[in-house]
Image (cartoon, grey):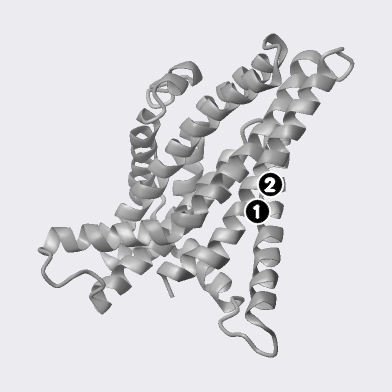
Amino acid sequence: MVLESLIDPLRAKKHPTRLFFLGMLFASVAIIFSLWIFQTQASLIMVFLTVMISVPLLYGTMAEEEHEDWILTTESRILREHSKAVLFILFLFLGFLVAFSLWFVFLPAEYSSSVFSIQLDTIRQINSHAVFGITGSSYSDFAYQNVVSILTNNIKVMLFCLFFSFFFGSGAIFIITWNASVIAAAIGTYFHQGLTLSLAPSFLPGILTYAHIFSLGLFRFMLHGVFEIVGYLLGGLAGGIISMAIIRHGVSHPLFKKVLYDAGLVFIIGIGFLVVGSLVEVLVTPLFFS
């Protein structure tokens, strides 16, 4: 109850950057309790505990955004308020991501491999299905196929966010938190490999070397990932708005069509972010990281 009551949606909209530090706090507390009580299952327990701490805030956010659909008269004002909610949830996600990444980096190897065991398995499965070369096709065909494949997968995740929010209220926070833990494991792995390969300039002192490689890892995965996360958040917001509208007013209310229209528009905007993210991942990220 103490952590859950630290902030509410209205204050979060006014001070979105505070959510970054709260996200770091939530994730760190979850990892500490996971290691303390559930060490052998820590990789999933830390995600569930982080979600549990965040659910009251996300539930309140969904309720607040649905309420604005009824009281605000123009779609532009409604979308402006939604953007504020998405912004502070994005900062919350970034807090999760940085905290998980730092714990991965600074925990002893035997602990980090245990705490992030399922996440590391997920990364290995993703890498095993990745395409590493071009055979019998032009680069443009290869890029197009990759964009379509990534976009299709991301839309599936976005639909999961929508359905989770629709059926479980703020259930999309589970998918967001899980993605944060997987990306953190990837960043931590990149960091350790970067130390081995000396990716930082030789003239940097020790702590700046760590900061340089960690920043590279964060940039490597969030260059395109930030667009994908915003898309997932918009999908979850759309599902949550519809769910709250049905619970509070029912489908027969005269303004329910307005809520559906708003949720549909939010979902379409989310797909637009996923399209941009897929293009950046295929066409831009490789320019910086081979």
Image quadrant containing the C terminus: bottom left
Q: Amino acid at mark 1?
A: Val
Query: Which residue is depicted at the point 24% across and 60% down?
Result: 212
Q: Nearer the viewer, residue 280 or 174?
A: 280
Disc 2 packing (10 Å; few <14; some 14–19; many ≥20): many
Does dot 2 land on a helix, a strand or a loop? helix
Q: Nearer the viewer, residue 226 or 251?
A: 226
Percent across and percent down for residue 79 are 63, 25
Q: Residue 275 versus residue 194: which sits nearer the camera? A: 275
Mark 1: few, some, or many residues within 10 Å (few <14, many ≥20)? many
Q: Quadrant of residue 95?
A: top left
**Is 164 left or right of 178, judged from the image as shown?**
right
User: Which residue is tagged 2?
Assistant: 271
Number of residue marks: 2
Q: Is residue 235 above or below residue 284?
A: above
Residue that sits furthest to the top in the current view? 71
Residue 15 percent across, percent down from the top left:
39, 23
For label 1, the SS is: helix
**Which residue is found at the position 67% from the left and 35% from the top?**
165
Image quarter where the N terminus lies is top left
Position in image of residue 234 (x %, y %): 63, 37
Q: Is residue 59 above or below residue 228?
A: above
Q: Amino acid at mark 2?
A: Ile
Is 191 rendered above or below residue 25?
A: below
- Decide if residue 103 is on the left or right side of residue 179: left
Contact flag, marks 1 and 2 (Cβ < 8 Å): yes
Q: Viewed as shown, does residue 81 lie left or right of 53?
A: right
Quadrant assignment, res 133? bottom right
Res 42 seen here: yes
Q: Which residue is mark 1?
A: 275
Q: Position of residue 128 (x, y in %)?
A: 57, 78
Give 20 or 280, whichever is nearer the viewer.
Answer: 280
